[in-house]
Amino acid sequence: MKIKSAEFVVSNSDVTKCPKDMLPEYAFIGRSNVGKSSLINMLTSRKSLAKTSGRPGKTQLINHFIINKEWYLVDLPGYGYARVSKSTKKVFQKFITKYFEQREQLICAFVLVDIRHKPQPIDLEFMQYLGERGIPFCIIFTKADKLKPNAIDNHVDDYRHIMLETWEEMPKHFITSSSKSIGKEEVLEFIDELNSG
Ligand code: GDP
């Protein structure tokens, strides 16, 4: 897919104020510092469409960008557990769960994980949460330039192994590096296929 235009539309923390025009949308989410802003900038070939770490005011908002006037790329805040008093129950921040439970135009969520780390409970639990609600998602492994190819394979295998304990198959996944521009076409082609399918 060629990116002809990529424009910021709106930021807010209230899902009811997100765009209402029913264009297909794709959400990008992960723990903070996973490389989400860098990935969004790589995908859209814009240097600073999404604000990368170190710049204030980027957190806790749902950011809509319109791409090629055809679909929304949604930059979601880094997730963490909400504090639930007197309970050990872990729940994700409310406005994130509201987003996933209310956005009917969401076609697919991309859950970003740093390829260097072993599978982390919060990422696995978040994927579990999406799966239980029937929300389609893929995994995007980030920062692949930090590992040698065989280490990449080993880390993906670790993920596959742990995912197969609860899932029938490993979710579709992409290996990316924003620094080396790896994986860009694969992700964009996948979105293109979903948009035209
Ligand atoms: P965000 O908090 O998830 O939006 O993460 P950022 O995109 O701001 O990136 C967090 C840090 O990781 C920054 O220091 C980036 O330079 C670095 N980073 C992001 N993507 C890559 C990548 O593909 N390769 C490497 N080596 N570093 C990256």
Image (cartoon, helix red, strand yellow):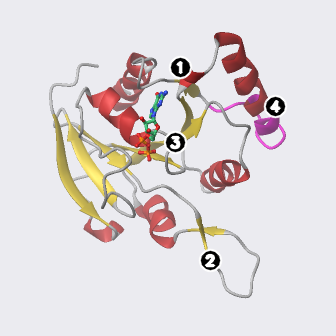
In this view of the protein, which residue sits in the foreground, 127 or 102?
127
Residue matched to label 2: 83
Q: Earlier in the sequence, mark 2 or mark 4?
A: 2
Identify the amino acid type marked 4.
His
Q: Residues within 10 Å of mark 2 (few under 14, many from 20)?
A: few
In this view of the protein, which residue sits in the foreground, 109 or 13?
13
Horizontal side of 45 relative to 100 (left or right) equals: left
Q: Earlier in the sequence, mark 3 or mark 4?
A: 3
Q: Nearer the viewer, mark 2 or mark 1?
A: 1
Q: Earlier in the sequence, mark 1 or mark 4?
A: 1
Residue matched to label 3: 34
Q: Nearer the viewer, mark 3 or mark 4?
A: 3
List x then y, in percent, for residue 68.
18, 32
List x then y, in percent, for residue 165.
84, 40
* Predominant secondary structure, magenta span: loop
Quick one: which residue is furthest to the top in this view? 149
Residue matched to label 1: 145
Question: Magenta segment range?
Answer: 160-171
Q: Which residue does the image show at 18% across and 47% down from the upper left? A: 8
Q: Residues within 10 Å of mark 1 (few under 14, many from 20)?
A: some
Of the four image quadrants, the one with ligand 1 is top left
Q: Nearer the viewer, mark 2 or mark 4?
A: 2
Question: Mark 3 and 4 residues: CB-CB less than 8 Å, in contact?
Answer: no
Ligand 1 contact, mark 1 (Cβ < 8 Å)? yes
Ligand 1 contact, mark 3 (Cβ < 8 Å)? yes
Residue matched to label 4: 161
Q: Which residue does the image show at 52% across and 28% down from the upper left? A: 143
**Marks 1/3: CA–CA distance:** 14 Å
